[in-house]
Amino acid sequence: MFSHISPAKLQGTLESYHSLNESEWSVSKKARDVIVWRRPSEEFGGFLYKAEGIVADTPQRIMDFIRPGPRRLEWDKMITSLEVQQTPEQGCCVVKYTTAGQLWNIISPREFVDFSYTTSYQLGLLSCGVSVESEEQSSGFVRGFNHPCGWFCVPEQDSEVSLLTGYIQPDLRGMLPQTAVDTAMASGLVDFYSQLRRALKA
């Protein structure tokens, strides 16, 4: 299922997104403490979204809440089920999860099967993933496909906060208007930070 996936190549792809100039992005949504950008994806016909915000905790603890596992299911309202299916090597796993419907169910519930890889990055961590092909599909869900995506989390210098930057490019599949996808992605990413911050405080 995942033998063709190179963690090093996946990491390199995420680092290439992370090195793009600000001029190559257009702002999709600005909240008080999160900014979401987008640009055309080089992987498929949709968009690559970038989100960035400050989170008051260490990269290690933040990533414990983000990476695939039972803790993610406890606080992330978008995820309705999550099962780690395989752990081929340390830092890697194959995870199957489902997401809730969005925009009054204009975007119906989705199911994804992803290869996930977490590694050190600068003084922090990078957790990246990409969907893998899987024939088993749950009834009542559209199977989505995540092109290379991930979260960089690095500590701010001389501070007790971290900079969290995410890159997301899901092919949700189905006949969806692009405006609905853009609205759902931008709002969902802003809400992700709010939920994460609340969970870390609790």
Image (tube, grey):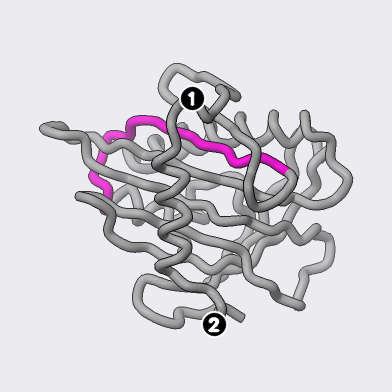
Q: Name the residue furthest right.
A: 175
Nearer the observer, disc 2 or disc 1? 1
Q: Which is more toward the observer, 17 or 36?
A: 17
- The quadrant of the rendering that contains the C terminus is top left
Q: Considering only vertical position in the picture, is 109 above or below 119?
A: above
Amino acid type shown at disc 2: Ser
Residue marked by disc 2? 3
- Taking the spot 80% from the left edge, 58% from the top edge, the residue there is 142
| Region of the chain picked out in magenta, as a range | 46-60
Where residue 77 sits, quadrant-wise, is: top right
Residue marked by disc 1? 23
The answer to whether residue 71 shows anywhere in this view is: no
Alpha carbon separation for disc pair 2 and 1: 36 Å
Question: Does residue 178 show up magenta in the picture?
Answer: no
Q: Residues within 10 Å of mark 1 (few under 14, many from 20)?
A: few
Q: Position of residue 80 (x, y in %)?
A: 64, 55
Q: Which is more toward the observer, 177 or 193?
A: 177
Where residue 7 sits, quadrant-wise, is: bottom left
Q: Residues within 10 Å of mark 2 (few under 14, many from 20)?
A: few
The answer to whether residue 156 shows anywhere in this view is: yes
Q: Position of residue 134 (x, y in %)?
A: 70, 75
- The quadrant of the rendering that contains the N terminus is bottom right
- Taking the spot 27% from the left edge, 48% from the top edge, the residue there is 59
Question: Residue 135 bears which disc, if any?
Answer: none
- Taking the spot 52% from the left edge, 30% from the top edge, the residue there is 24
Q: Secondary structure at mark 2?
A: loop
Q: Name the residue furthest left.
A: 158
- Taking the spot 60% from the left edge, 41% from the top edge, the residue there is 48
Q: Which is more toward the observer, 34 or 132?
A: 132
Amino acid type shown at disc 1: Ser
Q: Considering only vertical position in the picture, is 30 above or below 90?
A: above
Q: Position of residue 198 (x, y in %)?
A: 40, 36
